[in-house]
Amino acid sequence: MSIFKTRAIIIKTQDIKESDKLVWLFTEKLGKVSTIARGAKRSRNSLFSTTLQFCYGDYVLYKGKSLYVINESILIDSFQDLLDDLNDLTYASYFCELIDIAMSDGEKSEEMFKQLVTAFYLIRSHAVDIEILARSFELKILQATGYELNFDYCCICRKKMASFNYFSFQYSGGVCDKCKKINGLHIDYATGSALKYLSKISLENVYKVVLSDKVKKELYKVLNLVISQNYFRKPKSLDTLRYLKNFEKNKI
């Protein structure tokens, strides 16, 4: 029997049977894996408090016939406080949803694992603009899964660009002033600069970035379309948040 010990974050769960749970882990060593936690729905079970969504810890797994089985676990941080704030909950759910959509089962990325852990701590800190954090995280997951966007050179003529105000969805990058603009979106030059900067900095440095509402809206529009175009389904978490906020606004 193969036994693995790995650090992981729980990105989603599903109740099965009377007392068991399906638990999807994004792990440091094994990538994204589907597991079963036997008896984890029972409050007295040792896995009860370590198999909640967002939990971060060390997990010992063994390979069953079709799924990994969680044998034991040690909690590092439950991140359950993120459930107390709608924004925190939505963006943490969104990051987990992105990992689930973008990463195949068994696809390893220690870098993206570190990014997810960092993102959770930054959400909790309230020290960064959460929208800008999300855009930076999106750029990093696109890069990690083979969809890196090009902001340094015109994606059509390949000439170096100091700045750009058009994004091509067909060629996945910025287009210079001289090339033909097709299958893309006109954006502000500041949005082009923000895309370029956010693609290069670490999540820890996102707190330094201040953007106008117009630029943030354009960033969301561009990256939302890129994600929808490249992955098999579109994340729904942020759409739900926007619906709830619009509902509250209209109610007032």
Image: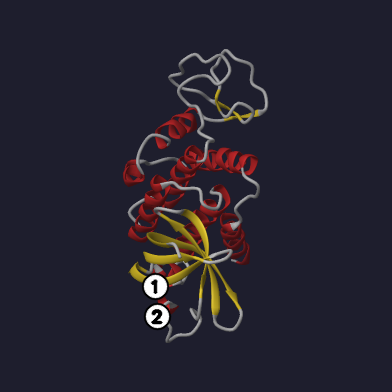
Tell me which residue sits at (60%, 15%) in the image: 179
Where is residue 67, by image quadrant?
bottom right
Describe residue 233's horizontal placement relative to residue 175 as left or right: right
Q: Amino acid at mark 2?
A: Ser
Q: Nearer the viewer, residue 225 or 219?
A: 225
Tell me which residue sits at (44%, 62%) in the image: 2
| Distance from Cα at disc 2 to Cα at disc 1 | 8 Å
Q: Nearer the viewer, residue 34 or 220?
A: 34
Q: Which mark is residue 72?
A: 1
Residue furthest to the front in view is 1
Describe residue 87's horizontal placement relative to residue 102 as left or right: left
Q: Are marks 2 and 1 in contact (CB under 8 Å)?
A: yes
Tell me which residue sits at (54%, 74%) in the image: 21
Spot occupied by residue 39 in the image (x, y as percentages of width and height): 50, 81
Spot occupied by residue 22 in the image (x, y as percentages of width and height): 55, 70
Q: Is residue 56 visible?
A: no
Q: Quadrant of the C terminus?
A: bottom right
Residue furthest to the right in view is 183
Residue 247, placed above or below residue 204: below
Q: How crowded is the residue under tag 2: few (<14 C-alpha within 10 Å), some, or many (20+)?
A: some
Q: Which mark is residue 238?
A: none
Q: How crowded is the residue under tag 1: few (<14 C-alpha within 10 Å), some, or many (20+)?
A: some
